[in-house]
Image (cartoon, rainbow, N blue to C red):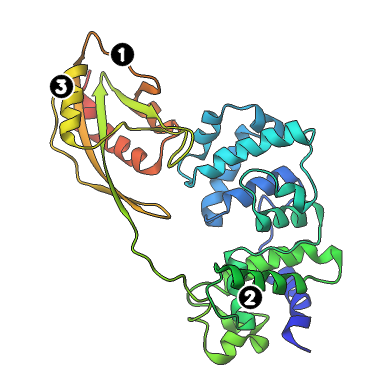
Amino acid sequence: MTLQSAFAARLVAWQKQHGRHGLPWQVSDPYRVWLSEIMLQQTQVSTVLGYYARFLERFPDLATLAAAPVEDVLAHWSGLGYYTRARNLHKAAQQVMAGFGGEFPARREAIETLPGIGRSTAAAIAAFAFGQRETILDGNVKRVLTRCFGIDGYPGDKKVEAQLWTLAESLLPAADGDMVAYTQGLMDLGATVCSRSRPACGVCPMLDGCAAARDGRTAELPQRKPKKAQPQRETVMLIALHQGQVLLQRRPPSGIWGGLLSLPEFESTLAIADWLEDNGDGELLPVWPELRHVFTHFRLTITPQCVPLQRLAASHCAEDGHVWLPLAQALDAGVPTPVRKLLLQALQSPAGATID
């Protein structure tokens, strides 16, 4: 018997005995399944667990999520990263309420029409929540399939990805009742056994048929994306402090950190000096050490400039999207991770402690 014909049966049996069980989203409620699938995109299970519980406490069902202000959703997502996921989650909830009568669609094709949901995520939701015969193909699954079946080429390449989709569809189990265990098994095998580095081949149920293990290619497969130089960007962030409060600015709804509160940004410290002349009496403290933050497509270097203000100018009025918040309250607002680090530093600094 070939590995291709035995794959599903082996995987289902392995998952039932060795796979992950008892995770809070291993339920048939499509809302909870959908939420977990979005949170788990590019994020570890251990990280998601806490966020998942807190998010459900505030937004226990789809209708509550749809009716909430997007700023509230972003605040409860703060720190999890990739904030487009949260904005799309909110839009999708509203779309389900308006276009599907509040009932989450069961078919993969319909699920895929919702914002932020691609083919693999839609398939996972359809399989877990509704038992549909749909195959997933996330990063973990691509790694399992390229190794087991010796698939060459970068999996992100369209031709290679099309080959993997065809292979994945051919591996589905014969019994519909095995779809949940099979789909979970694909995720579990990639996450816990067939890991990127140091795969535990000795306990893999596919070992005797795995092409990569047979040919000594586990380190080589899947082939990595050709490297490109990562762009570098720089910004200066203003940490304006006055009477225990910090000035924040609401970012545009789209783009990096879209919709989140952040520190105002300037091209240079000289531009901040100009801002200070128009907005009050204070001093430019020595700049803090640079803070580097890595995004998917570029690296950002942040120069933090702290400015304690003894007096706001009489003409000062926060522009649209600007707000003064107490430092401690700002930490609980929806702010990006590097901004939270700077706010913590401000709270613990003499400038943050002595402004009154």
Mark 3 highlights which residue?
Answer: 282
Instruction: Work out which quarter of the rendered image holds the N terminus and state it.
Output: bottom right
Disc on the earlier residue, 2 or 3:
2
Report the side of 173 relative to 288 (left or right): right
Rendering coords of residue 157 (x, y %): 55, 69
Asked if one can make out residue 60 in the rendered structure from this viewpoint, the answer is no
Instruction: Work out which quarter of the rendered image holds the C terminus and state it.
Output: top left
Residue type highlighted by circle 3: Gly
Determine the secondary structure under disc 3: strand
Report the side of 128 relative to 277 (left or right): right
Residue type highlighted by circle 1: Cys
Rendering coords of residue 274 (x, y %): 17, 25
Most extreme residue toward the top is 314
Q: Which mark is residue 145?
A: 2
Disc 1/disc 3 C-alpha distance (Å):
16 Å
> Contact (CB < 8 A) between labels 2 and 3?
no
Disc on the earlier residue, 2 or 1:
2
Mark 1 highlights which residue?
Answer: 317
